Amino acid sequence: MKALVLFHSQQYGNTGKMAEAVAEGLREAGCTVSVHNANEERYPITEYPEYDMISIGTPDYFSYMAGTLKTFLDDWYIQRNKPGYTG
């Protein structure tokens, strides 16, 4: 199984530490794992369908998710019904 762990974290944030722990658990379960910090760059929409699962980690900003991960979900929502896109 191919997994993506996508998260938003500052340089030494707890969300990043949790994302690494999730990735390690997935590796121990036999998954091939890619880890991406959305705070560093936007994740390319063309790569979403390559994964069997996506784990999303975000800090809680007054009950709202990080803007970079909101953008990820918006991109997926827009793209999901386009012909030829699977994911």
Image (cartoon, helix red, strand yellow):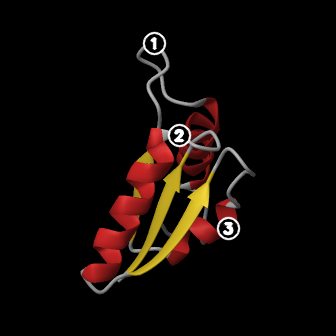
Q: Indicate which disc, 2 or 3, sits on the residue closer to the N terminus.
A: 2
Q: Which mark is residue 36?
A: none
Nearest to viewer (mark 2 / mark 1): 2
Q: Position of residue 56 (x, y in %)?
A: 43, 49
Q: Which mark is residue 62?
A: 1
What residue is pinned by disc 2?
13
Q: Position of residue 86 (x, y in %)?
A: 50, 70
Secondary-structure class at tag 3: helix
Q: Residue at x 56, y 40 (%)?
A: 69
87 up-or-down from 57: above or below: below
Secondary-structure class at tag 1: loop
Residue 32 image-quadrant placement: bottom left
Q: Indicate which disc, 2 or 1, sits on the residue closer to the N terminus.
A: 2
Q: Amino acid at mark 1?
A: Phe
Q: Residues within 10 Å of mark 1 (few under 14, many from 20)?
A: few
Nearest to the observer: residue 67 or residue 37: 37
Q: Amino acid at mark 2?
A: Gly
Q: Residue at x 63, y 70 (%)?
A: 47
What residue is pinned by disc 3?
46
